[in-house]
Amino acid sequence: MTNVLVTGVARYLGAHLAARLAADPRVERVIGVDAATPPTELAQVLGDVDVHRIDLHNPGMLRLIVDGEVDAVAHLAVATAVDQQGGGRTAIQQGGGRAAMKELNVIGTMQLLAACQQTARLRKVVVRSSTAAYGASFRDPAIFTEDTEPREVPRGGFAKDVLDIEGYVRGFRRRRPDVAATVLRFAPFIGSSAETRLTRYFTAAVVPTVFGRDPRLQFVHVDDAFEVLHRAVVEQHPGTFNVAGSGVLTLSQAVRRAGRVAVPILEPGLSTFAGVARRAVSLDQLDLFVHGRVVDTTRLVEEFGFEPRSTSEAFDEFIRGQGSDALLGPDVVRAVERSILNKIRQVRAVRAALEASSD
Amino acid sequence: VTEPAVASGDVWDDRVAGALAFLRERLTGDYEVDEFGFDRHLTEGMFLPLLRPFYRTWFRTEVSGVDHLPKEGPALVVANHSGTLAVDAVMLSVAVHEETPASRFLRLLGADLVFRLPVLSELARKSGGTLACNPDAERLLAAGELVGVFPEGFKGIGKPFAERYKLQRFGRGGFVSAALRTGTPIVPAAIVGAEEIYPMIGNVRPLARLIGAPYFPVTPTFPWLGPLGLLPLPSKWLIEFGEPISTLDYVDSADDPMVVFNLADQVRETIQQTLHRLLERRPDAFSA
């Protein structure tokens, strides 16, 4: 029987993982922490979870871990972007935005791992990371394995945070080799229930893309992400793992499958725009849409004995869940095709009739 | 997927129906792209039909030694590079697809400049290319693909016309270690004809530096005739695939610089000699 502490329970991912773990008979008790109060729809999910509203860098964290006799920590309080629904992610309100995001991601992880380091009982740490850890460079190989080092320090804030977070985990591993530390590098999440920046992007009427670039994208279905997180917490899988659906969709292909219309924009203009209006377009997103990102998941499949559904399946499931408000759905295209073919047939029939009558 | 068929038997009707089906599959994203970004649907449906007239009519390409390419499984095709623009790489992959019984695809390894440029980078990926780096080369070879590489790089493609058919240095022989590590045979390929398509008689270095290109070519038609200067001259092309060089005996020596260097040199010599032999067969660069 294990006691688990989950951070970031005021967000979708943290709340649902905490609920899943609470329902698992192998787990005795789940403590959920977040600097913010979970919104009502998540609070309903968290019925069996012992929720504490506390900052990661509050000294009380250590008490919580020790008194709660915590065996495993799942660290999900990582913000991927500046814009935050719900607000008040951190107690530090200095300017909010990027500063608050960095505070949560980098300082939060550092403090949490420092607390973890001091607790003798702890056996497992699971940290949410991202495939953004591979950075973005034109000299990158097409497919990243867990051993690929980033060639250039990425310009996006989240990607920089991810590198810092993983750096702290490396330090933690050195100091506490007895604790199994699992780092999960997730591809962007997609699914019919979760709403993310990316799902909002693919449901907009017109979709901005970068001119002359058609990045290869990978997604992971949110439910598969939960499965992997769940297994990492209750089983024993130390190491760093890419978590993504196998296969690839190019951005143009994904936009077409979603029945949307892509509007290519010149990259220099977008970069400037992203520099000025960080809330609208982040450099992280821009890098993804220029370089794309594909990872090898062999290590995950072998170690976890679990294969997430493919990128294409995950995306199609998301599209099905969206209903049919598509501008250019497959039905429309098929109907146009059929009508053209019918027109040709009609013209031919008329011509054949004319030729027959003139003979 | 049910194909709306026109049962008229008319060849044009079939073509129209085929084109519409292709267009529908494009518009709805109903095709597969591999992890390197290779879009077989687009390559077969659009790129190859556009390139075939150049391959057959414009350059009148003659290919020999196709039997030296494996019917299935991996091989590393190493070829000479020339012609100011990498038309030779494109034609080599058309040759592989047209002449091999299984219509195989040649997966080209390109310089990072290619992947830096918008549009071009995507054309390269969609037609099966990827960045020339060992992880990608080894991954493609391990997956049983035919991989094409031009070790001369910009030194070969950007050399002046006066130095035509003189092989340049082969770099550090990274391609050899990729073949060694995967135990893949190396197939040397000699391409004659590409040197004459854009004869480079000058190189405006300051302009090249300004736009960040390795060279800024001056040919008899470029830049004088503007975009018309981009039309390649209709030289006669000969491509020969040489006997495969087995690497199985050296699998453990992928990190041994002497082994790598010697193998690279052997490949280079083979290509150079084949080029001389092919040139004797083609006394006139623009012959039929």
Image (tube, rainbow, N blue to C red):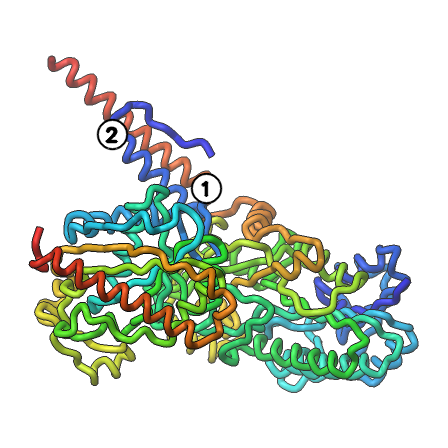
Q: Does residue A110 appear left or right of residue A190 in this picture?
A: right
Task: Specify the quadrant that holds the N terminus of chain A.
Answer: bottom right
Could you tell me which chain the residue with mark 1 belongs to?
A: A
As rendered, which of B232 and B190 lies closer to the eye?
B190
> Residue at label 2?
B11
Q: Does residue A166 appear left or right of residue B256 in this picture?
A: right
Q: Position of residue A241 (x, y in %)?
A: 65, 65
**What residue is shown at x 58% (from left), y 79% (from top)?**
A160
Most extreme residue toward the front is: B249
Asked if residue A83 is positioned above or below residue A229 in the image, the reply reads: below
- How would you rate the neighbour count of disc 1 (Cα within 10 Å): few for under 14, some for 14-19, many for 20 or more? many
Residue B58 visible to the viewer? yes
As rendered, which of B190 and B45 lies closer to the eye?
B190
**What residue is shown at x 87% (from left), y 60% (from top)?**
A27
Dividing the picture into quadrants, the one containing residue A49 is bottom right
Q: Position of residue B243 (x, y in %)?
A: 32, 55
Residue A208 visible to the viewer? no
- How would you rate the neighbour count of disc 2 (Cα within 10 Å): few for under 14, some for 14-19, many for 20 or more? few
As rendered, which of B187 and A231 lies closer to the eye?
B187
> Residue at label 1?
A330
Task: Specify the quadrant that holds the C terminus of chain A.
Answer: top left
Asked if residue B251 is positioned above or below residue A353 in the image, the reply reads: below
Whole-Å distance between the Cαs marked 2 and 1?
27 Å
Mark 1 residue type: Pro
